[in-house]
Image: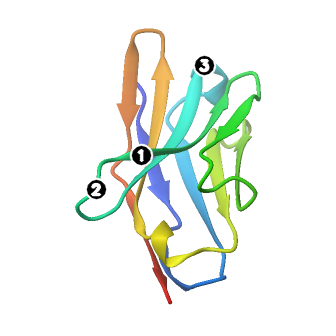
């Protein structure tokens, strides 16, 4: 079992920055991949960024160059640094952790970007 708790969401003006955190209940090295997804009102949940236990990262085209995913193994936490935020980044952001055969979700954190 893995519990994931997101934090760091809030209201920010366009062009601003936020850093989201996803704290895991066990070592992130034991989790194959940690991923951020987001879901805007009336839209499907979409992939944002992934970091594997080996440190490989990947980003959706819509956030590439603006968002950075990273991990702190000492804190069992994965971060999503979001810069140059746009109103279209407004969504609930969810953290997901995948192990062999299981997928775990956090409760989500709201990010609102005003124009």
Q: Where is residue 63 in the image (x, y as percent from the top left)?
A: 63, 56
As drawn, the label of residue 43 is 2
Q: 97 left or right of 66?
A: left
Q: Mark 1 points at which residue?
A: 46
Residue at 75%, 28% in the rendered image: 56
Q: Residue at x 49, y 78 (%)?
A: 87
Residue at 43% from the left image edge and 70% from the top image edge: 90
Vertical side of 86 occupied by 55: above or below: above
Nearest the viewer among 91 and 105 is 91
Find the distance from the CA under tag 2 to the CA under tag 1. 9 Å
Q: Which of marks 3 and 2 is nearer the N terminus?
A: 3
In this picture, residue 43 sits left or right of residue 2: left
**Residue 110 in view in this figure:** no
Find out whether the residues at labels 2 and 1 contact each other: C-beta distance under 8 Å. Answer: yes
Disc number at residue 30?
3
Q: Residue at x 56, y 75 (%)?
A: 86
Q: What element carries label 1?
A: strand
Q: Which residue lies furthest to the left in this view?
A: 42
Disc 1 crowd, CA 10 A, few/some/many (<14, 14-19, 20+): some
Q: Position of residue 72 (x, y in %)?
A: 73, 42
- Secondary structure of the residue carrying numbered label 2: loop
Q: How crowded is mark 2: few (under 14 residues within 10 Å), some or many (20 or more)?
A: few
Q: In this view, does 7 lie to the left or right of 57?
A: left
- State the CA–CA distance, disc 3 to disc 1: 24 Å
Q: In what quadrant of the picture does the N terminus appear?
A: top left
- Residue 67 % position (x, y): 68, 57
* Up/down of 84 relative to 67, above or below: below
Secondary element at tag 3: helix
Residues at badges 3 and 1 in contact (C-beta under 8 Å)? Answer: no
């Amino acid at each position: 079992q893995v519990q994931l708790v997101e934090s760091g969401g809030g209201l920010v003006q366009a062009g601003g920055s936020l850093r989201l955190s996803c704290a895991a209940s066990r070592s992130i090295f034991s989790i194959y991949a940690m991923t951020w997804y987001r879901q805007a009102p009336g839209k499907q949940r979409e992939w944002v960024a992934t970091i594997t236990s080996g440190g490989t990262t990947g980003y959706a085209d819509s956030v590439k160059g603006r968002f950075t995913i990273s991990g702190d193994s000492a804190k069992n936490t994965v971060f999503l640094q979001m810069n140059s935020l746009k109103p279209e980044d407004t969504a609930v952001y969810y953290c997901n952790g995948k192990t062999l055969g299981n997928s775990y979700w956090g409760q989500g954190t709201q990010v609102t970007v005003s124009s």
